[in-house]
Amino acid sequence: MNSTHWDLASSPGLTGVILPVVGLVVVVVLIAAVVWGRRSKAAEARPPRPEEQPRLPESGPVGEVMEEREPNEVPRQEHDRLTPTQLGGTSPVRPGDRKDSDDPGH
């Protein structure tokens, strides 16, 4: 190596100015992010106090409804796939004929 390479490497020049500026920009961006986060957190609604929490109704918790439903049959086709509109997905689900819905196995 000749002496010009050593002179460029040891002189502060442009690199000596750019690195502190970049470091300062990073610090300013981080400080701005913290300030912005604190302001947005302060603008949020406060969490509800314990007396503002929802309560169970006087009748107690609402029971779960168990019922059997009839499935909508999927039409059989041997070629192209069916799209959701071809399946008729907007048709209402009909309740099934089974009346013994108290059986937990079904």
Image: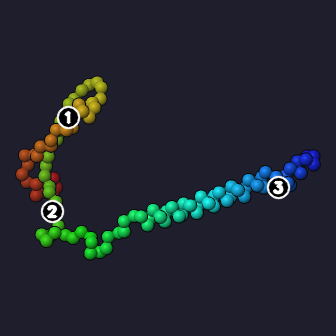
Q: Amino acid at mark 3?
A: Pro
In the image: residue 37, left or right of residue 31: left
- Residue 58 is labelled as none
Residue type of the residue flagged with mark 1: Gly
Residue position marked by numbered label 3 in the rendering? 12
Q: Residue at x 76, y 55 (%)?
A: 17
Question: SS for tag 2?
Answer: loop
Q: Is residue 104 above or below residue 57?
A: above
Return the x and y of residue 12 as percentages of the image width and height. 82, 55
Which one is closest to the eye, mark 3 or mark 2?
3
| Structural crowding at the residue carrying mark 1, measured as other residues with C-alpha within 10 Å and reported as few (<14), some (14–19) or many (≥20) | few
- Decide if residue 7 is on the left or right side of residue 14: right
Q: Position of residue 97 (x, y in %)?
A: 7, 46
Q: CA distance from mark 2 to mark 1?
A: 31 Å
Name the element at disc 3: loop
Residue name at image x 13 percent, y 52 percent: 67
Q: Which residue does the image show at 16% across and 60% down from the upper left? A: 64
Q: Which residue is mark 2?
A: 63
Marks 2 and 1 in Cβ contact (< 8 Å): no
Q: Amino acid at mark 2?
A: Gly
Helix, strand, or loop for circle 1?
Answer: loop
Name the N-terminal-most of marks 2 and 1: 2
Q: What residue did someone put label 1 on?
A: 88
Mark 3: few/some/many CA within 10 Å (<14, 14-19, 20+): few
